[in-house]
Amino acid sequence: MLNAKASCLCGNVKITANEINPKFTVCHCDSCRVWGGAPFFAVQCGTNVEFEGENNITMFDSSSWASRGFCAQCGTHLFYKLKTSGEYNMPVGFFQDLTDLTMDMQYFSDQRPAYYCFSNQTKEMTKAEIMEYFANKI
């Protein structure tokens, strides 16, 4: 596990993630692509995450199992948080000093648009597989 610090664009929110999984995921779902204009490249950070400037964080319930957080001042996408477990997934580019990362999984692979693809060989889960997985977690 890795640990790293980051802040939003304006610096009002600072984050320390103490248990970052170096195997990151990419989500191609419609919500992630609308949220960031592209697939969501995310590192899993578990629940051992510390925030400074929490009063600047706005949350949005994006599904029955997760919420998304962003800085209310500058709009930086901060995290995708699972409601049941409290685990955070944060943008890979947020932690600029991380090295030795590996793309491990692609979620909602059947929703990946035809206009891009990755050469990385990864595991993949379709929408049906993801929905079945989260049906047992909610």
Image (tube, rainbow, N blue to C red):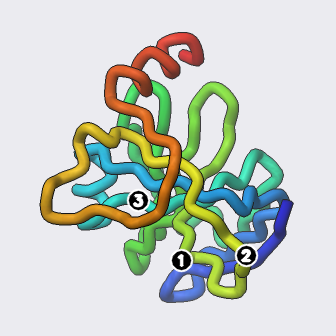
Residue 118 - label? none
Q: Which quadrant of the structure image shows residue 110?
A: top left
Q: Secondary structure at mark 1?
A: helix
Q: CA distance from mark 2 to mark 3?
A: 19 Å
Relative vertical location of residue 1 with respect to residue 92 in this rendering, above or below: above
Residue 60 in percent (x, y) is at 40, 46
Q: Which badge, 2 or 3, comes first in the chain's sequence?
A: 3
Q: Which badge, 3 or 1, comes first in the chain's sequence?
A: 3
Q: CA distance from mark 2 to mark 1?
A: 13 Å
**Crowd band around label 2 with a 10 angstrom C-alpha radius: few (<14), some (14–19), many (20+):** few
The answer to whether marks 2 and 1 mark residues whose Cβ atoms lie closer than 8 Å is: no
18 horizontally vs 15: left or right: right
Q: Secondary structure at mark 2?
A: loop
The nearer-to-camera label among 2 and 1 is: 2
Q: Amino acid at mark 1?
A: Gly
The number of discs equals 3
Q: Which quadrant of the structure image shows residue 22?
A: bottom right
Look at mark 3 in the image and give the residue it sits on: 40
**Crowd band around label 1 with a 10 angstrom C-alpha radius: few (<14), some (14–19), many (20+):** few
Q: Secondary structure at mark 3?
A: strand
Q: Quadrant of the C terminus?
A: top right
Q: Which badge, 2 or 1, comes first in the chain's sequence?
A: 1
Q: Amino acid at mark 3?
A: Phe
| Image point (54%, 80%), residue name | 8
Look at mark 2 in the image and give the residue it sits on: 100
Look at mark 1 in the image and give the residue it sits on: 93
